[in-house]
Image: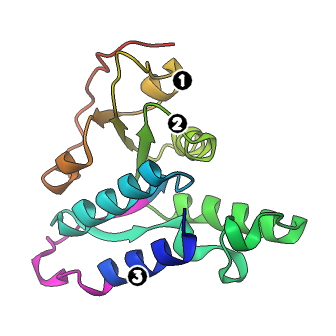
Amino acid sequence: MNEAKLIQDLEEINRNVDNSKKLPGAKNVYLAAGWFSDKQEELLKDAFIKLSANPSIAHIHVPLLHQYGGMALGESNNEPGFEWGAMTYKADIKAIDNSDITVAVFEAEDPDSGTAMELGYSVASNTPVVSVFDGNLDEHPINLMLSFGTDAHVTSTAELVDYDFFDITPNRYMGKLI
């Protein structure tokens, strides 16, 4: 994990977004995803790229780009203080409150607990949730709290580019549960 490089990559992706193709009434998204493994980093970047290309999405809030004091939890901040933790938490909660939709990205093999909390808060605050469950869902079943906590789900970040966020139609999770 190279958090500084990931932040640079996300900022570069954001600079290259073509906002001229956004539809009127496009939605603001809170992108909940871990970045604590190479696979989680890959999923976060790919989800950001795909959502950025989706004309029904106006703005994407990526918590990693908005950490308190500009310092994310990782190699350079592996022992965060109380102030950093409290303020980062509050900023994330406020960002969910300010979003129209939460997109929660889970790696089946290693679902991030912070992303699970963000999904739970979104559900409690009536923010619609679209989840990505990526990986072998038969070998690594999804926790029922995650699968039932989502309004709709997809099984690949690739599906986010064409997903209609104006019409989030609930769908039933069909994989194994734990």
- Residue 170 pos. (x, y %): 27, 30
The residue that disc 3 covers is 11
Gap in Å between the C-alphas at discs 2 and 3? 24 Å
First to last magenta residue range: 15-30
Which amino acid, mark 2?
Pro
Which amino acid, mark 1?
Met
Quadrant position of residue 60? bottom left
- Residue 47 pos. (x, y %): 31, 57
- Residue 104 pos. (x, y %): 43, 46
Q: Within the magenta stretch, is there residue 23?
A: yes
Residue at position x 86%, y 70% from top? 83
- Residue 24 pos. (x, y %): 16, 72
Question: Could you say whether the residue bearing mark 3 is in a helix, strand or loop?
Answer: helix
Which amino acid, mark 3?
Glu
Query: On screen, 5 above or below 148?
Result: below
Looking at the picture, tell me which residue is in the foreground, 104 or 72.
72
Mark 1 neighbour class, 10 Å CA radius: few under 14, some 14 to 19, many 20 or more: few
Of labels 1 and 2, earlier in sequence is 2
Question: Could you say whether the residue bearing mark 1 is in a helix, strand or loop?
Answer: helix
Left or right of 159 in this view: 31:
right
Looking at the picture, tell me which residue is in the foreground, 37 or 19.
37
Gap in Å between the C-alphas at discs 1 and 3? 32 Å
Residue 169 visible at all: yes
Q: Within the magenta stretch, is there residue 174?
A: no
Q: In the rendered structure, find residue 111 and report the number of the disc placed on it.
A: 2
Q: Quadrant of the N terminus?
A: bottom right
Gap in Å between the C-alphas at discs 1 and 2? 12 Å
The residue that disc 1 covers is 145
Foreground mark, 1 or 3?
3
Quadrant position of residue 134? top left
Of labels 1 and 3, earlier in sequence is 3
